[in-house]
Image: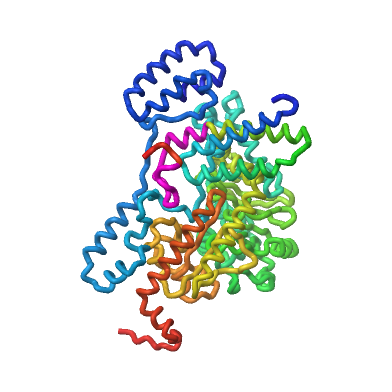
Amino acid sequence: MLLRNSLVSNSLRATQVSLRSIYSSYNNTLSNRSYHVSMVNRAAAGAATANKQAIEIPDDIALETHTDVQAATKDQADQRSAASSDAEITDALTSGTTALNYAYRQDTGFGTRPIYMDMQATTPTDPRVLDTMLKFFTGLYGNPHSNTHSYGWETNNAIEDARKDIASLINADPREIIFTSGATESNNMVIKGIPRFYKKTKKHIITTRTEHKCVLEAARSMINEGFEVTFLNVDKDGLIDLNELEAAIRPDTCVVSVMAVNNEIGVIQPLKEIGELCKKHKVYFHTDCAQAYGKIKLDVNDMKIDLLSISSHKIYGPKGIGALYVRRRPRVRLEPLLSGGGQERGLRSGTLAPPLIAGFGEAARLLKQEFANDEAHINRLSKKLVDGLLSLEHTTLNGSALHRYPGCVNVSFAYVEGESLLMALRDIALSSGSACTSASLEPSYVLHSLGADDAMAHSSIRFGIGRFTTEEEIDYVIKAISERVKFLRELSPLWEMVQEGIDLDSIEWSGH
Amino acid sequence: MAAAPSKTQILSLYRQLIKNSKQFTNYNFREYFLRKSRLEFKQNMLQQDPVKVNELVSKANEELAVLKRQAIVSQLYTFDKTVVEPLDTHHKKH
């Protein structure tokens, strides 16, 4: 059916006769299977209307992929029941709270795949993006730098169209967009490239403590090359102090790098004010917009941004591609990381990837097209989630409540260990911080720099809301979190003490 | 498309969008395209300008084609249902 439909719609009528015979023999093979009968009958009855019907795919064609969450939690549950001699755990398991037996929804009649709430780590690829990309994986495989034939021209045109879509979202010129492998590469290009280019006169870099690891590590490696780096502190809301920034700028400062939206707490830095300040002191202003691009309004001219990093997979695009905006007037000079054929204005050599770039461009175009509706949807769900979670006692929202991107909600649940809560939430895909550090049990350095104590930093969880999150999912998350936080607190001796009115800070813990 | 699409043509377009959105096996994509189709038709319900209407209709037709293709892809590569999704109602499988 699939074959026939696509061919007919391409009006290859001449082949229809031969196809029909293939088609009918195909139907015959299907009708041997009882569960296909209704479908086949319908198709046979309405051969003329087959085009109008939605296409149905036989079960044996579909490739099913299963989630492995079940295996892991089954093991856990088995272990628990094996350890049932432990009276406390048995009590808890039979206490009437059904929430934790398996750490995922057990009532049959529902699926098992977790709800995806980790939109800061990455986002699902939009089907419309995939639709754009597929033709580059099937027919349009030319090297975009091949100037001598149409295979090259068609992919090159697609890349230039994508460049336009990506640039227009930040009010930039398409020629100012440099494609890279992702925001990490873009950030490295800036933090290493600019100081290296100006190393004869400039020796100083300014950034903040709450930046993404790739900026912090790149800056640290520049210290080894003989540069000085100032890491600005943030206040308890996660915002930098503009006076502190101005005081930190020296005559030999070459670049200030401040992220737009923080990946862990969603705080939006005052970009425009920072831009003005940098312009006043003639210092390049770089901003890491991996989490901000297309989600908040950005304008490189209005905000006086000289360099801006973008990542495709945070905006429902494909993974493995990103971009760096590099201002042309006044020209920003930087030493490229990669040497080679001199593609992308000589700043990033290497053959461009047309499928990824076309997908990235389509994702950017969709962001622009859907901006108002997406924003309204995310704001509504975010408000619901924040209200629902903060209605639990002893929960706090991390980061500024006013200057934040609503799609990133970071909440601390006091007296609950964040990692154990995550273990108890196998049915919701969440993270306690950035994915890069989720393997370690270290509390988040971002929350630390906000002045949160270890306990609060440990008990925080980040919720990401995006275009594809539904209201039903938010309701489920609120219910699951409320139940399981309550359950875990009942196990906690600290919580018992708090309920008895003991001030935990007054206790002197004795070490053994 | 003719000069001005008739009310029936637009309604049939809307029905096709909804029908094809429902074909997605992925819960989040299905819900998103249903929400989007409903919202956009509602937002443009009072649109009178024939030029604008034509523009919207041709855009919706393009999106319908994308939906048809991607609904197939979604059925070719399937995954377990999510925890908020009842197992039997939406799709024939299981």
Quadrant of the rendered image containing residue B67: top right
Residue at 63% across, 69% down: A240
Q: Is residue A175 positioned above or below A331 on the image?
A: above
Foreground residue among B32 and A124 = B32
Region of the chain picked out in magenta, as a range: B69-89
Residue at 43% across, 56% down: A428
Q: Residue A66's spot in the image, x, y percent?
A: 36, 44
B76 is within the stretch colored magenta = yes
A448 is within the stretch colored magenta = no
| Left or right side of A480 for A147 | right
Q: Is residue A169 positioned above or below A450 on the image?
A: above
Query: Is residue A48 visible from the viewing direction of this image?
Result: yes
Q: Quadrant of the N terminus of chain A?
A: top left
Residue at 60% across, 24% down: A150
| Left or right side of A248 for A423 | left
Quadrant of the rendered image containing residue A34: top left
Q: Quadrant of the C terminus of chain A?
A: bottom left
Foreground residue among A217 and A113 = A113
Q: Is residue A15 positioned above or below A186 on the image?
A: above
| Left or right side of A150 for A96 | left
Foreground residue among A68 and A165 = A68
Q: Residue B91's spot in the image, x, y percent?
A: 43, 39
Q: Residue A250's spot in the image, x, y percent?
A: 67, 69
| Left or right side of A380 for A70 | left
Foreground residue among B17 and A448 = B17
Quadrant of the rendered image containing residue A259: bottom right
Residue at 53% across, 32% down: B68
Q: Residue A94's spot in the image, x, y percent?
A: 30, 67
Instruction: Give the residue at the far right of this rendering.
Output: B49
